[in-house]
Amino acid sequence: MAKEPVRVLVTGAAGQIGYALVPMIARGIMLGPDQPVILHMLDIPPAAEALNGVKMELVDAAFPLLKGVVATTDAVEACTGVSVAVMVGGFPRKEGMERKDVMSKNVSIYKAQASALEKYAAPNCKVLVVANPANTNALILKEFAPSIPEKNITCLTRLDHNRALGQISERLNVQVSDVKNVIIWGNHSSTQYPDVTHATIKTPEGEKPVPALVNDDAWLKGEFITTVQQRGAAIIKARKLSSALSAASSACDHIRDWVLGTPEGTWVSMGVYSDGSYNVPAGLIYSFPVTCSGGEWKIVQGLSIDEFSRGKLDATAAELAEEKALAYSCLS
Ligand SMILES: NC(=O)C1=CN([C@@H]2O[C@H](COP(=O)(O)OP(=O)(O)OC[C@H]3O[C@@H](n4cnc5c(N)ncnc54)[C@H](O)[C@@H]3O)[C@@H](O)[C@H]2O)C=CC1
Ligand SMILES: O=C([O-])CC(=O)C(=O)O
């Protein structure tokens, strides 16, 4: 029997990530090739005409899985009945800015949209915040939507995770699909900690640890980390626009794995509400290694954390605590 369509919200849908993301969702890349969808697209009035153009193109593409399109500038209409909400709406940084420089504009959007989601989304709606500063926007959304379970509010660090897989694949000249279990800890910012301590490569002789295969601690603790941390800035420098196709693709990966589950033996990185695991202060949205099953994520427990990693985990947590304080000062 054909599945009932799922309503998926994309905010900021007239923007550049939105333009890459909505066709992926309509093609089944986010929720699977047998899952029909109804797209809800929200943007602000100055972008209404462009948003309508995106809607026209979705109609023109004749996606078999796409059962309807709502294109609106009304947050209530946009949020009504959605089971997945991908929050991309906001303002991107420009060259030379840190992601937290867009804080004051963006956190107020997330405070406002929290209540529309809380009141009108489907019960158990899964929320993914993409707009920067992603962790802190997600935290503000959580705090101003107290009836949404905290496990349902996440932020995107899967792009950083995928960037780390890509860098290891290039360095070792192996297929990216053979690299797994990198970790992004902490903030989606330049303090994030891309960690390959537990990562492995699939080889004909079985799984081998990445640190032994790379065999260059200076690179792993130096250039590898800064390349991943600074990749967003490198894309802005090259394109004069921030990452869009990779952000959209990673947002699909994030929701797909959350809804449909991670493969056995594989974890991914998600920004989730900290429960104090790994001595990360509770009450921050922090990126952890997680596995997903039955539509729920779970933080991978029991990984060893050496002294180098401990320092990095704590530094990015400290930045998130500062961002939280800054966000509240912007809102008051
Ligand atoms: N977490 C991650 O890995 C990544 C996050 N980003 C962030 O995603 C966000 C979007 O990036 P782009 O699509 O490149 O930006 P963009 O400027 O092309 O599009 C953003 C869209 O949001 C809309 N918007 C603004 N306020 C809104 C509101 N209150 N409600 C609904 N829509 C609203 C704008 O009109 C625009 O159409 C930025 O904050 C960017 O920094 C970008 C790449 C990766
Ligand atoms: O760097 C930016 O501003 C956009 C972004 O978050 C990324 O590409 O990771």
Image (tube, rainbow, N blue to C red):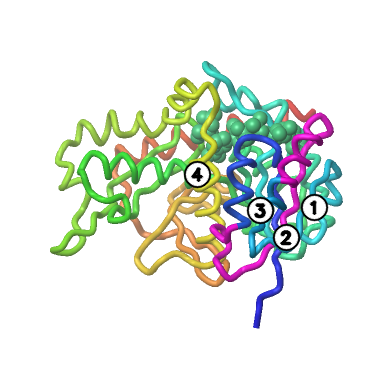
Dot 3 or dot 1, earlier in sequence:
1
Q: Give the range drawn in magenta.
A: 27-56
User: In the depicted view, which residue is nearer to us: 48 or 205?
Assistant: 48
Q: What residue would you read off at disc 3?
A: 127
Residue at the spot of label 2 = 38
Give coordinates of residue 69: x percent, y percent.
76, 54
Residue 112 found in image quarter: top right
Looking at the picture, which amino acid does disc 4 mark?
Answer: Thr
Specify few, some or many for label 4: CA neighbours under 10 Å numbering under 14, 14-19, or 20 or more.
many
- Residue 141's tag is none
The residue beneath circle 1 is 70
Residue linked to disc 4: 157
* Residue 40 belongs to magenta span: yes
Q: Are marks 2 and 1 in contact (CB under 8 Å)?
A: yes
Tell me if residue 157 is in the magenta stretch. Answer: no
Looking at the picture, how far across and down is residue 74, in whole percent? Answer: 86, 44
Of residues 13 and 320, the one nearer the viewer is 13
